[in-house]
Image (cartoon, rainbow, N blue to C red):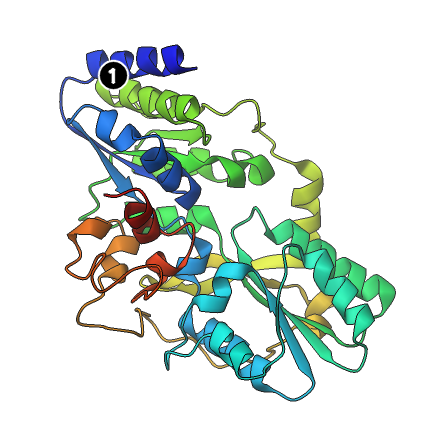
Amino acid sequence: MITQCHQLLRQIEHTCTRPWTVMEVCGGQTHALLRHGIDQLLPESIQLIHGPGCPVCVTALSRIDQALALAEKPHHLLCTYGDMLRVPGSDGRTLLELRSRGAAVQLVTSPLDVLALARQWPQRRVVFFAVGFETTAPATALLAERALEERLPNLRILVAHVRVVPVLEHLLKEPTCGVQGVLAAGHVCTVLGEQGLPALVQRYRRPVVITGFSAEELLRGILQCVQQLEAGCHGLQNAYPRAVQAAGNPQARRRLERVMEPIDTPWRSFGVIPGGGYRLRPAYAQLDAAPGAAKEPKLEHSPIGPHSCCSAQVLRGALRPNQCPSFANPCSPEQPLGAPMVSSEGACAAYYRYGR
């Protein structure tokens, strides 16, 4: 594999005749790029921009506030994935802090864990704070189906799932956007396949390459993107064929479409993105943990250290994490000022972990 990576690096270097700016969308890819040192091995003519590919980082403050409020209610048990426990709401509090004060907050690794908890604690209102891209949304949809099948009256879902293609459209249509090519999130495409990407390519005339997570897969994706840019063309390519088919995962897509529907959704630091998230369809609305919630604010930034935390610019790809004046000191994973340093997939956490 090392030999293959060296060959791909040489091909990239020989292909590049001018500077190019490429954005990887997925936070997992950001970590992999830094872990393998690819950001330092690439020719200086290639600039990598880190996209908003961390669902924990872009979850709206209002959704986190709703989760905090639910966790504080008597006889409630709030369940969510690990990183969400440490992301602050608008008043700076976190679910982890509430748990230390006696609130019933449970870390889970799968939505089906929530199903077991709802059976175990029939006297509690068990709420699943569901976050993630289209990768994890089908599992939440499965939870909703099982909850209705079993007629569990005490299970509710606070849906905060977000969608990748709408945020890409939001970024690429901005007049100041400097992204010339996109590495699409391979894990999302394992579910959706190529859905939405060909139209994006044609509308904004940028090459999009579906890319995996190993060093070889990332380099192959970068090479294919640069080859298109150098040729002056734009198209959709799949550099992750071992996991991604054009149609994605039909069963997962059907389940997702049965249970959820796209809605306009606020993203932290982006404002409301048309079609940017999901909600439960009417047939499953009885499971909604926050029906009729207040409208979201137009734009949401990090609630902590607004004068010292540049997470808004980092999430939009306008700033590298280590260009923030607070990076590493005082902002660190132990004392984070913004969500990208909290999340294990956040760009700031990646730069800190790998010494950038």
Position of 266 with respect to 171 (left or right) is right
**Residue 320 percent across, percent down from the top left:** 21, 48
Q: Quadrant of residue 45?
A: top left
Kind of residue sitting beneath label 1: Ala
Q: Is residue 228 above or below residue 173?
A: above
Q: Residue at x 30, y 54 (%)?
A: 315
User: In this orientation, which residue lies closer to the viewer: 340 or 143?
Assistant: 340
Quadrant for the C terminus in the image: top left
The residue lying at 37 percent from left, 10 percent from top is 3
How many dots with numbers?
1
The answer to which quarter of the image holds residue 172 is: top left
Q: Is residue 195 visible?
A: no
* Residue farthest along the bottom direction in this orientation: 74
**Residue 137 screen position, x and y as percent:** 60, 53
Q: Give the percent coordinates (x, y) of residue 307.
A: 17, 72
Can residue 355 be spotted in the picture?
Answer: yes
Q: Does residue 232 sit above or below 167 in this rendering? A: above
Q: Quadrant of residue 94?
A: bottom left
Towards the viewer: 301 or 38: 38
- Residue 352 in the figure: left or right of residue 308: right
| Residue located farthest toward the right when viewing the structure as drawn | 150
The residue drawn where x is 36% and y is 35% is: 35
* Residue 40 versus residue 353 in the image, above or below: above
Question: Tag 1's secondary structure?
Answer: helix
The one of 263 and 113 positioned closer to us in this rendering? 113
Mark 1 Cα-neighbour bin, 10 Å: few <14, some 14–19, many ≥20: few
x%, y% of residue 352? 29, 49
What residue does disc 1 label? 231
